[in-house]
Image (cartoon, rainbow, N blue to C red):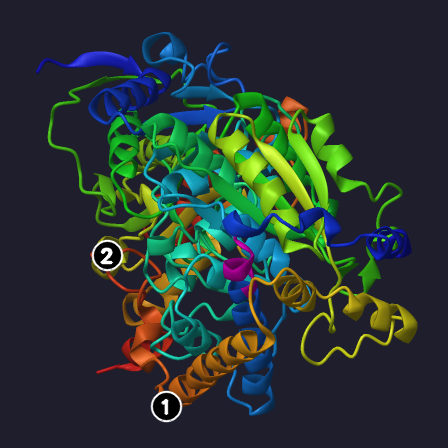
Amino acid sequence: MALQELTYRDALRKALADAMTENPDVVILGEEVGRYGGAYGVTKDLIKEFGAERVIDTPISEPAIVGAAVGAAMTGLRPVAELMYVDFIGMTMDQLANQAAKIRYMFGGQIGVPMVLRTQGGTGRSAGAQHSQSLEAYVMHTPGLRLAMPATVADAYHLLRMALTKPDPVVFIEHKALYTMKESVDLDAEPLDWGKAAVRREGRDLVIVTYSRQLHYCLEAARTLSARGIEATVIDIRTLNPLDFDTIRAHVERTGRAMVVSEGVMTAGVAAELSARITEECFDFLEDPVVRVAGEDIPISVSTALEAGSVPGPQLIADTALRMLAGRVPA
Amino acid sequence: MYEADLRATAGQTMAGRVGAGANTRLPELYRTMRRIRTFEERVGELFVRGQSAGSMLHLSIGEESAAAGVCAHLRDGDSFTTHHRGHGIFLARGADPARMMAEIGGKEAGYCHGKGGSMHIADMGLGHLGANAIVGGGIPAVVGAGLSARHHKTGAVSVAFFGDGATGQGILYESMNMAALWGLPCVFVCINNQYGMGTNIAQATANPNLHERAAAFGLAAETVDGLDVEAVAEAAERLVEGARAGKPAFLAVSCYRFYGHARKDKSPYRDPVEEEAGRRQDPVAFARAALIDRGLESESELDRLDTEIGSEMDATIDFTVAQTEPPLASMFRDVYAPEEPEPEPVRARIDRVLARD
């Protein structure tokens, strides 16, 4: 099929519509998903196509939205629960971490909870401290939950379609600053496997490991670095659980330098986990300490200047790489 | 509040039920309750013998009528969730007491292969979507099961069982609101044993008429005296059938928790006089007296039944003691689906990191 120009939002919507057409047990439930069309428009008009019994507008009750999805998934539906902002995940943490994540294990493998929790996070819309966080570490820290964070339009489509075939609960975190991003994609092309990292750029000097919106900042930084004679490999891990560490290891062993870039706060975050693993497993190959470039250990401000300053950007990523390779950069 | 209950039941006689004879389900309800009572006594014995896994054992002695009365109106395909005091409900739905006891003992032969135990026992075959150790945690799952029943037009109902303690949790109200809003086949059964751990319901709410809360959300809502299992069963029949027809319901069953919160709790926070009065509100003894009084069973027939049940439940302990613990390697199983790789053990990772050439 020919390439088509799609936004990240349209790709997500198409993934939901295609899954609902293919599988009559797929239902969506969440706040404003029906008549309103989703706070960010991802479910726009799906209610017209699939009806109010499959695109279910709920009261503002995040714990029960997730809890109902758990019960639905255990009794034969394929629910997609929507959490309007990942910042509300604390409201749902019992249903997510104590119920959805542990049911298969606690019950000795009798049943799984094949549900998807769609949500979005990150900075970029001056939305303040309670609507701008990157809380993926909460999810990654909970065994039993799968975690996907698409950075590209093609992944928005394919990862969501794949998430809807997985036997275990998947938390699917979109980035609010990517919804309007456009790409030409061929949705019929063979997608990359679930759980496989994407090497978005190859270079000999260092590896930058990242995901979600920071991928685009890393690629921008890599172009800057290239102009200075430094070639970076950029790995988009796409799914944080399962994590494709083999791809990371192979490239770190080849280049001997690694940087991990994440929008989430630095301390005890995803970057900390990745950095620890690279240090442990690639120790003999490393020329430099693994460097984390992550969100500041502070809440996000509504001021656009403070907001942008709170998270990594292309400049910080490029500057950090230049310092790591200081001895090798032509003056 | 509880004293008011006692006064109400003191004036109650069995006269109203005399002659209800031929079609009564009382013998069956009695048998279910006696099996629960005896099973729970054996659970206590397992604990005393040091054979139960963990220290968290919550007995439902005194609450048997809620399990027996409500489950009498559930059928194949229906589902339910329970709380941390849910052994009786599972038994009333047809659980094998030996596999239950083995699970409580943390043995491989248990319902969940020793991973769940008393508070996380479940069985999909019997529609048991899971016991829960989070107060109120199992409640919203019945809303999801209700959505499934509506979607697949199965006619099934889903019942959440929980204690009065869970009426302090917001998730109950979120769930009842959704069930009422969407007309789902859900029933919320509050087993009001008067205590959330050591806190009496009167110390936890200004309005202990719990059904009024459910009525405010638009559910059919009743409170019934748990001393009389037939009254519980009658109320349950109305409400369960109503729910099947799209009118979700709430039933509060008033009863008394005979013993402490968990096995080691001697309930020093309760007045002995209150405890004595509470234990007189015994639904098993009440049903037994009614069977004899109404000529449905003789004392000797009931003695024989009780002895049979005693032997059946004794055997669950022997069975459990003879079973093996799950193998250590099973620890990594069932975190994810069987076709997915198991998590890498910490020891294997350490070995890999330290294997320097």
- Residue A126 or residue B39, whichever sits in front: B39
Identify the residue at horizontal 28%, vertical 60% (top origin): A256
Of callouts 1 and 2, the N-terminal one: 1
B219 vs B207, left or right, is left
Specify start and end residues of the magenta stretch as a single range: B25-30
The amino acid on which the numbered mark 2 sits, given as a three-letter code, is: Glu
Task: Bin the neighbour count of mark 2 within 10 Å (Cα to Cα): few under 14, some 14-19, many 20 and up.
Answer: some
Q: Nearer the viewer, residue B201 or A258?
A: B201
Residue denoted by label 1: B322
Q: Which residue is mark 2?
A: B340
Image quadrant where residue B171 sits: top right
B14 relative position to B310: left or right: right
Residue B18 drawn in magenta? no
Q: Tell me the element at label 2.
A: loop
Front one among A180 and B173: B173
| Residue B258 position within the rendered picture, expressed as x and y whole percent measured from the top left | 74, 70
Which quadrant of the rendered structure holds the C terminus of chain A? top left
Question: Label 1 is placed on what type of residue?
Answer: Ala
